[in-house]
Amino acid sequence: MSLRLLAVFARIGFLDMLAYRLRYYTGVINYFLSVTVYYFIWKAVFASNPTLGGFRFDQMITYVTVGWIIRSLYFNNIDWDMATDIQEGKVAMAMLRPVNLPLTYMGRALGEAAFRTLLLSLPTSIVLALIFPINPPKDAAHLGAFLLSLAGSVLLVTSINFIIGCCALELTSIQGLLRFKFWMQELLSGLLVPLALFPAPLRKISALLPFEHIGYTPMMIYLGKIEWREIAFTLTLELLWILSLLWFANWFWLRLSRRITIHGG
């Protein structure tokens, strides 16, 4: 029953995003510009050194390009949507329905991910592959592991965003928290800089958090820098983070929703 409801809400989320499809067409341009900036930055860095942190220039460009492509897929705004719904009083009405509210937002996020895959990630992949030198995955097995890790990325981001959104039940505004989470995720997921280039203390801290499994893990699997003897452990660790965050998200919602205060309509 839960899976059927999840599919229903995912379909609703997909259809809702159709109203904003023009924004995603322009998103292809934004991602292209982001990769272009990084391309010239890394080109200048590698001009004086053929390798950096175990990366060659072609591997770094592949890392950057694939990183921005998968970001276009796993990104969502359910934390902001939840905060808005809570402040406008929509959550009170939603809680009157005999439906698991966390399941509603999770389903919408998965629907958005499906929408992004078709209308943003695939077009972005085609454009970037035609312009930048992107290496293929190491082999078919690594490609399969990459796709599994990427599916996990969507669930990790959705879980984290739902937890942040729940904070709006206690706080009048979560804009500061949203910005903090955004930059933590961008940095510690390895999107801005590969985690292999981080100072050792910061690298140890990032290893204790789930963010590296959002971007860094799938990208390193794609490049073949995580061998098979390590992939099973890495994917298991990612799965444990997913299950832990999903459990905590549901517990956090149940705990805070008992003390809900509506700030609007």
Image: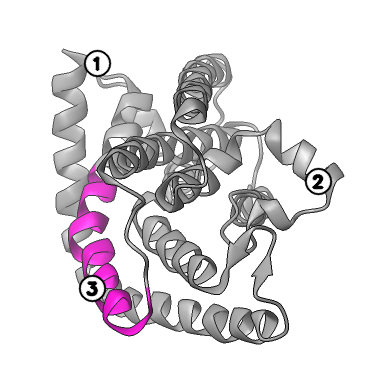
Image location (x, y in percent) of residue 80: 48, 50
**Comes first in the chain, label 2 or label 1:** 1
Residue 184 lies, with reference to residue 121, above or below; the image says above
Residue mark closest to the camera, 2 vs 1: 2
User: Is residue 76 shown to the viewer in this render?
Assistant: no
Local crowd size for mark 2, using a 10 Å CA cut-off: few (<14), some (14–19), many (≥20): few
Image location (x, y in percent) of residue 206: 71, 40
Q: Residue at x 51, y 42 (%)?
A: 217
User: Is residue 151 shown to the viewer in this render?
Assistant: yes
Name the residue that disc number 3 marks: 126
Q: Residue at x 33, y 30 (%)?
A: 93
**Marks 3 and 2, how far apart at CA:** 35 Å
How is the protein colored in the picture?
A: one colour
Q: Amino acid at mark 3?
A: Ile
Image location (x, y in percent) of residue 71: 42, 57
Magenta region: which residues?
Answer: 111-133
Name the residue that disc number 1 marks: 98
Indicate the quadrant containing the C terminus: top left, top right, bottom left or bottom right: top left
Name the residue that disc number 2 marks: 202
Q: Secondary structure at mark 3?
A: helix
Indicate the quadrant containing the N terminus: top left, top right, bottom left or bottom right: top left
**Marks 2 and 1, how far apart at CA:** 45 Å
Is residue 131 a member of the stretch shown in magenta?
yes
Is residue 182 a member of the stretch shown in magenta?
no
**Marks 1 and 3, how far apart at CA:** 43 Å
Left or right: 131 in relation to 39: left
Check contact, mark 1 vs mark 3: CB within 8 A: no
Residue mark closest to the camera, 1 vs 3: 3
**Comes first in the chain, label 3 or label 2:** 3
Judge by depth and name the residue closer to the eye, 138 or 87.
Answer: 138
